[in-house]
Image: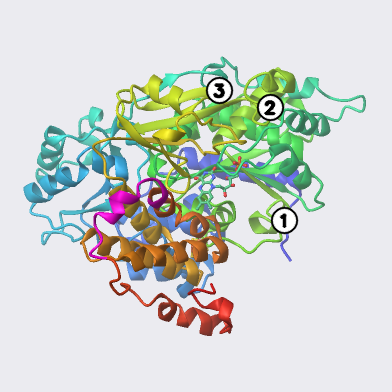
C-alpha cells in the first residue's frame, strides 16, 4: 500500500523540492553518469521522476546512452526494461545519438500549407543532411515532429528543443549559417526564438485584470456559516455549469465534487497543458500571458476538493515556457498563494509542480497523462476506476484543461450568474478558438459560446473557404453548407482548433495527412487502433497513387466503424473521422483518384485482423469484418 507523510509536511517537502528546481545547484558535468546523478539530485530518486530524468539527460547529451539508462535504472530502483520502455515511447527521447543540432520541423497540415516541406528540403540541401539521419560529422540531424503548436506563426521547427517560428528561406539560411559555424544556441539572435502573442479578440479570459489572489480571496469570502469554503466553491462551479474546455465537455463541478468525496488523501489537481491536437494553441497563449489565472484556478480547485498536490503537465513542445512558469510559481509562493497556510488560512496547504512531457499526443488523454506523470509510458488506463477515485499514484485526482481552470477562477471571483449571462442555454461562458490556415488574421479569438462558424471566418479574414476543420483532426470537418453552425456543446463541440481551408486545397490530401498523424500517434496498446490506423494511412496512400478502388472506400468505412467501436481510448475512436467526414463532404476528391470500379481491394482487412482475433480468443461472426460486421 502507498504510504505518504501527513499533508502539511508533504506540501512543505514538495515545496522545498520545487524551490530547488528554480535554481538547480551548479554541477561540473564530465560524463553521462554525472549528468544522470545531477538530474536525479535535481528531481529526486522516486520512480515517478523517471521521465523528467530522461528528459534532462536528453537535453544535456542529445540522446540516451545505454550506460546512462543502466545507471538510471539502478538509482531509481527500476527494472532496466521499464526504463528502456519509457525511453522508447516518447518521440523527443532518442536511444541513438542525434546530431549536435537536432532539428525537428513541425509537420502539421498548416505547416505544409505554408511551405514547410520545401523549407526542410532547403535546409537539408544547405547542410548536406538526409531527413531522419545524422550527418556523417555528427553535426546535425533533421526530422519531423507532429505538431509544435505554432500554426499561427508557422512554419516552425525545434532546434535542440527551442522553437523557431515564422520560417522562410532567409531564416532557414540564417539557421544553416549558425549551425555550420557551430555557434552555441545561447549565442543565436534572440529574435529567432521569439514566439509572438497573436490574440485577436479578447473576452474575460484574456483581458480580466485579475490580481494574484483575487479569486482566492473571493472564495474565502464565500465561506458558509460554519466557515467551510470547499462546498460553496463546488456549488458555485456547479451552478455556473462550467463544462470542460479540453473538448469532451464534462461538467467540471460534478467531477470536482465526486473527487472531493473520496476518503483518500492527499488529493491531486492536474492541469492538462498537453495541447497536442493539431491546430490548437490557445493554451499556449494562456500559459504565456495568463499564467497567474491558470494557477489561481488550480488553487481554487484545490480549495474545492481539498487537494494538497498540483501538477501542470506541460507538453514538451512548450518546454520554452518552463522558466517563466517556474518564476510565476516562485512568486506566488513568496506571496503566500502557494505552499502552507495559503492566504493565511490554516490547513490550506497546496503547491504546484511542473512536469514536462516529451512528445506524445496520446498523453493528452487524461489517464495516459496521469501514467506519464508517474514516469511511465503514456498508455491510457482501463476505467473504472475513474481518476477522481484512483488517479495519480492511486490518489483521488482531477484533470482539467488549462482554459477550464482559468474559467473556474473567474467564476469564483465574479459568480455563477455572471458566467451564465454569457453564452448559450447549455454552454455558459466564452471559448477560446485557435484560428489557423487560409486566413489573413490567424490567432486566438475569445467568443461567447454560440458564435457561428461564418462569424469566425469573417473576423479572421478568410476568403473562398471550402472547409473548416473544427476541433482538429479528431473533431468535425465542415463544408460551406454548414458555416451557419454554432460553436457550442449543443452543436459543434471543440477543444478550440479551427483550421481554415480555401478553394486551393485538396481535402483528400488533408484527410490523408490526418490519417498518417493518427497512425504515427497510436500508442499501439490495442489492436483495432494499432492496425486500423496504419491500414487507413496505407489505403489513403494507395488511393493517392491512383491505385485505389471503390472497395477501398468501403474498407475504410468498415475500418472507421471498427476503430470507433473497439478502440480503447478516444484517439482510436476518432482516428477515422477525418476520412469519414471528407468522404461524406468531398467525395469527388476521392473518386477522381480511383482506378476503376470493381478492382480488387488493396488489403485483406479480415486477414489483417486475424492476429487480433487470436489474441482476444474470438472467432465468432461478429469478430470478422465483412457484410455481417
Ligand atoms: C488522444 C487524446 C488527446 C487529448 N489531448 C488533450 C489535451 O491536449 N488537452 C486537454 O485538455 N484535453 C485533452 N484530451 C481530453 C482529456 O482526456 C480530458 O478529457 C480533459 O483533459 C479533461 O479536462 P476538461 O474537463 O477541463 O476538458 C485528450 C483526449 C484524447 C483522447
Ligand atoms: S486506441 Fe490507440 S492510442 Fe488509445 S490505447 Fe488503443 S492503441 Fe493506444
In the depicted structure, whether residue 201 falls above or below residue 466: above
Q: Residue at x 49, y 74 (%)?
A: 625
Crowd rating for badge 1 (residues with CA inside 10 Å; few <14, some 14–19, many 20+): few
- Pointer 3: what residue? 205
First along the sequence among labels 1 and 2: 1
- Pointer 1: what residue? 4
Tag 1–tag 2 contact (CB < 8 Å): no
First along the sequence among labels 3 and 2: 3
Q: Secondary structure at mark 1?
A: loop
In the image, 257: left or right of 176?
right
Residue 223 on image: x %, y % = 84, 24
Residue 596 on image: x %, y % = 24, 65
Tag 1–tag 3 contact (CB < 8 Å): no
In the drawing, what numbered circle is on residue 425? 2
In the image, 305: left or right of 473?
right
Callout count: 3
Q: Secondary structure at mark 3?
A: helix
Tag 3–tag 2 contact (CB < 8 Å): no
Residue 200 on image: x %, y % = 41, 20
Residue in front for this viewpoint, 548 or 232: 548
First along the sequence among labels 1 and 3: 1
Task: Pick out the residue farthest to the front.
Answer: 597
Residue 375 on image: x %, y % = 52, 59
What is the spatial separation of the Cα atoms under label 1 and label 3, in whole angstroms? 37 Å
Q: Residue at x 40, y 44 (%)?
A: 278
Please provide the residue range marked out in magenta: 583-596
Amino acid at each position: 500500500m502507498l504510504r505518504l507523510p501527513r499533508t502539511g509536511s508533504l506540501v512543505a517537502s514538495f515545496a522545498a523540492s520545487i524551490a530547488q528546481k528554480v535554481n538547480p545547484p551548479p554541477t561540473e558535468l564530465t560524463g553521462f553518469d554525472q549528468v544522470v546523478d545531477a538530474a536525479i539530485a535535481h528531481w529526486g530518486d522516486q520512480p515517478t521522476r523517471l521521465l523528467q530524468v530522461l528528459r534532462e539527460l536528453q537535453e544535456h547529451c542529445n540522446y540516451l546512452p545505454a550506460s546512462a539508462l543502466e545507471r538510471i535504472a539502478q538509482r531509481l530502483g527500476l527494472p532496466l526494461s521499464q526504463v528502456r520502455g519509457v525511453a522508447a515511447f516518447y518521440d523527443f527521447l532518442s536511444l541513438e545519438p542525434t546530431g549536435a543540432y537536432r532539428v525537428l520541423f513541425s509537420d502539421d497540415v498548416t505547416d505544409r500549407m505554408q511551405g514547410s516541406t520545401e523549407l526542410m528540403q532547403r535546409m537539408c540541401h544547405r547542410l548536406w543532411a538526409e531527413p531522419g539521419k545524422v550527418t556523417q560529422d555528427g553535426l546535425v540531424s533533421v526530422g519531423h515532429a507532429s505538431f509544435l503548436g505554432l500554426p499561427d506563426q508557422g512554419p516552425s521547427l525545434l532546434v535542440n528543443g527551442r522553437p523557431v517560428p515564422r520560417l522562410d528561406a532567409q531564416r532557414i539560411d540564417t539557421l544553416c549559417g549558425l549551425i555550420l559555424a557551430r555557434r552555441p544556441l545561447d549565442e543565436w539572435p534572440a529574435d529567432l526564438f521569439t514566439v509572438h502573442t497573436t490574440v485577436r479578440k479578447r473576452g474575460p479570459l484574456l483581458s480580466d485584470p485579475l490580481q494574484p489572489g483575487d479569486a482566492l480571496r473571493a472564495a474565502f469570502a464565500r465561506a458558509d456559516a460554519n466557515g467551510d469554503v470547499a462546498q460553496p466553491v463546488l456549488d458555485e462551479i456547479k451552478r455556473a455549469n462550467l463544462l470542460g474546455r479540453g473538448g469532451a465537455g464534462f461538467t467540471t463541478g460534478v467531477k470536482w465534487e465526486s473527487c472531493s468525496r473520496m476518503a483518500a488523501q492527499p488529493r491531486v489537481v492536474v492541469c492538462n497543458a498537453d495541447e497536442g491536437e493539431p491546430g490548437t494553441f490557445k493554451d499556449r497563449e494562456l500559459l504565456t500571458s495568463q499564467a497567474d489565472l491558470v494557477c489561481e484556478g488550480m488553487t481554487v480547485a484545490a480549495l474545492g476538493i481539498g487537494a494538497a498536490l498540483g501538477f501542470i503537465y506541460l507538453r514538451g513542445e512548450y518546454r520554452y515556457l518552463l522558466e517563466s512558469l517556474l518564476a510565476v510559481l516562485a512568486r506566488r509562493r513568496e506571496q503566500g498563494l502557494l505552499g502552507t497556510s495559503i492566504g493565511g488560512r490554516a490547513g490550506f496547504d497546496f503547491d504546484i509542480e511542473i512536469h514536462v512531457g516529451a512528445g506524445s499526443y496520446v498523453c493528452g488523454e487524461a489517464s495516459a497523462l496521469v501514467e506519464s506523470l508517474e514516469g511511465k509510458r503514456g498508455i491510457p488506463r482501463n476505467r473504472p476506476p475513474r481518476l477522481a477515485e484512483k488517479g495519480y499514484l492511486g490518489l483521488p485526482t482531477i484533470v482539467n484543461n488549462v482554459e477550464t481552470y482559468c474559467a473556474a477562477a473567474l467564476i469564483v471571483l465574479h459568480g455563477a450568474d455572471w458566467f451564465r449571462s454569457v453564452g448559450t442555454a447549455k454552454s455558459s461562458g466564452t471559448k477560446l478558438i485557435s484560428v489557423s490556415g487560409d486566413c489573413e488574421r490567424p490567432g486566438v479569438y475569445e467568443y461567447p459560446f454560440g458564435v457561428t462558424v461564418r462569424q469566425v471566418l469573417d473576423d479572421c479574414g478568410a476568403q473562398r473557404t471550402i472547409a473548416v476543420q473544427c476541433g482538429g483532426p479528431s473533431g468535425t470537418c465542415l463544408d460551406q453548407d454548414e458555416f451557419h453552425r454554432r460553436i457550442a456543446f449543443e452543436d459543434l463541440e471543440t477543444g478550440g482548433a479551427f483550421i481554415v481551408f480555401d478553394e486551393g486545397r485538396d481535402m483528400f490530401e488533408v484527410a490523408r495527412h490526418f490519417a498518417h498523424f493518427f497512425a504515427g500517434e497510436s500508442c499501439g496498446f490495442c489492436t483495432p487502433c494499432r492496425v486500423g490506423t496504419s491500414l487507413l494511412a496505407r489505403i489513403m496512400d494507395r488511393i493517392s497513387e491512383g491505385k485505389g478502388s471503390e472497395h477501398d472506400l468501403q474498407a475504410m468505412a468498415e475500418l472507421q466503424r471498427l476503430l470507433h467501436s473497439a478502440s480503447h481510448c478516444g484517439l482510436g475512436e476518432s482516428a477515422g473521422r477525418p476520412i469519414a467526414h471528407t468522404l461524406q463532404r468531398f467525395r469527388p476528391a476521392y473518386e477522381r483518384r480511383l482506378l476503376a470500379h470493381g478492382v480488387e481491394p488493396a488489403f485483406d482487412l479480415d486477414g489483417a485482423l486475424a492476429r487480433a482475433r487470436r489474441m482476444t480468443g474470438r472467432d465468432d461472426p461478429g469478430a470478422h469484418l465483412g457484410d455481417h460486421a
